[in-house]
Image: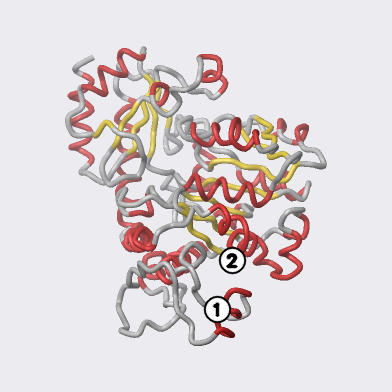
Amino acid sequence: MEPLDFSTKVLHTPYLREDSHQALRMPVYDSVAFSFDSAEEIEAAFRGSKAGHVYSRITNPTLEHFENQMRTVSGALGSMAFSTGMAALSNLLVAIAGQGENIITTRKIFGNTYSLFAETLTDLGIEFRFADFSRTETIEPLIDVNTRAIFFETITNPQMEVADTRKLATIARKHHLLLLADTTLTPPYLFRSKEFGVDVEMISSTKFISGGATALGGVILDNGTYDWAKNRKVAPFARKFGPFALMAKLRKEVARNLGATLSAHNAWLQSLGLETFTLRVDQACRNTQAIAQWLEAQPKVRSVNYPGLKSSHFYEVSQQQFGKRPGAVLTFDLESKEQCFEMINGLQLIRKATNINDNKSLILHPASTIFCEYDAATLKSLDVRETTIRLAVGIEERQDLINDLASAFQQI
């Protein structure tokens, strides 16, 4: 039998335990705790010598099925879901790095991620060193004996930069470092992270996966390509759990203790979203390509930033890594902040809202919203301009979106 495609894998991922009613869709197990037949059985479940759900902060049947679906479609060795994408990221970094250790990254990342790095985790003693990932020669001088990982976004939000993942992987392998990727804009189906050398993938499943912004969620995928004995914090688990050491570290310590659990109901909504994932992604990516090309022809637009455009500095590497589906988010620049606001206010169909990869198209002005807490000097270092608009394209009919944009430009 030929290998199954993404949607078929999602729809036919088997339950890890038999459902008593043979439901075609995994039920929502909205239960905190689960009963056992004997003291010996519950002891075995707590110790991990026998599979079983004891408490939903740690595992839950509905959550387990969603994690199994993500593992199946991505080809990852291990999968763990969290309450949000930021929870997934923070749990991952706390698991692999500690006080006095450092992670190499870039300033061209999502605003809340930059805040997590520059403020929250820095206060805990983890250092973040910032390189220019469009010039990979700037990375190695920052590496020392306390460096634990290289972290990047496959497409930066909102700068729309695309790092050459294979070059990053080569550097990471040379220095025995983890390569960590936030693939929120290019989750599995758009990008096969393992093939490009990524060790661990983090996704905000709130976006494409949830099925239209129905539920918050986050996922960590371990591709099984890193020797966890080389990481100081995970090594004790590697001796007992081998390649599953990161998942054990998270489930038996970090995630269990921090408590950022994905609820059973939200896990069910994420599983439901996966069933229509490819249909929505294909439509959104086609729409984005068409709108980006249309925007390039508009006289009031100074520049359009989308990796799918041949004019993009990142077109070639984007084609190698994402093919014809380089995400469904673009940015474009006008003459001034005032023009940006006039343009946004002139829209009637496209919603003025944060979030990306909803079924609806969403627009905002990043500098005055997601990055509003930063001063002008910091915004410049992050490459966030007051002239930039971010458009997260949905699955509407593209001509309706173009008509709405055309009408808004007439208001400027």
Q: What residue is rendered at 71% in x and 30% in y?
A: 138
Q: What residue is rendered at 75% in x and 62% in y?
A: 236
Q: What residue is rendered at 42% in x and 67% in y?
A: 32
The x and y percentages for residue 279 are: 31, 56
What quarter of the picture does the C terminus occupy? top left
Q: Amino acid at mark 2?
A: Leu
The x and y percentages for residue 94 are: 63, 48
Report the colour scheme. secondary structure
**Of helix, strand and loop, which one carries label 2?**
loop
Q: Is residue 283 left or right of residue 315?
A: left
Q: Is residue 369 left or right of residue 191?
A: left
Q: Nearer the viewer, mark 2 or mark 1?
A: 1
Is residue 10 shown above or below 206? Answer: below
| Crowd rating for badge 2 (residues with CA inside 10 Å; few <14, some 14–19, many 20+) | some
Residue 130: image quadrant is top right
The x and y percentages for residue 194 are: 59, 57
3D distance between C-alphas at marks 2 and 1: 18 Å
The answer to which of marks 2 and 1 sits earlier in the sequence is 1
Is residue 222 shown above or below 101? Answer: below
Is residue 341 shown above or below 156? Answer: above
What quarter of the picture does the N terminus occupy? bottom left
Question: Would you name the residue on which mark 1 appears?
Answer: 51
Callout 2 touching callout 1 (CB < 8 Å): no
Q: What residue is rendered at 67% in x and 48% in y?
A: 169
The x and y percentages for residue 280 are: 31, 53
Toward the right, the furthest residue is 145
Residue 265: image quadrant is bottom left
Q: Amino acid at mark 1?
A: Ala
Is residue 7 shown above or below 53? Answer: above
Question: Would you name the residue on which mark 2 appears?
Answer: 77
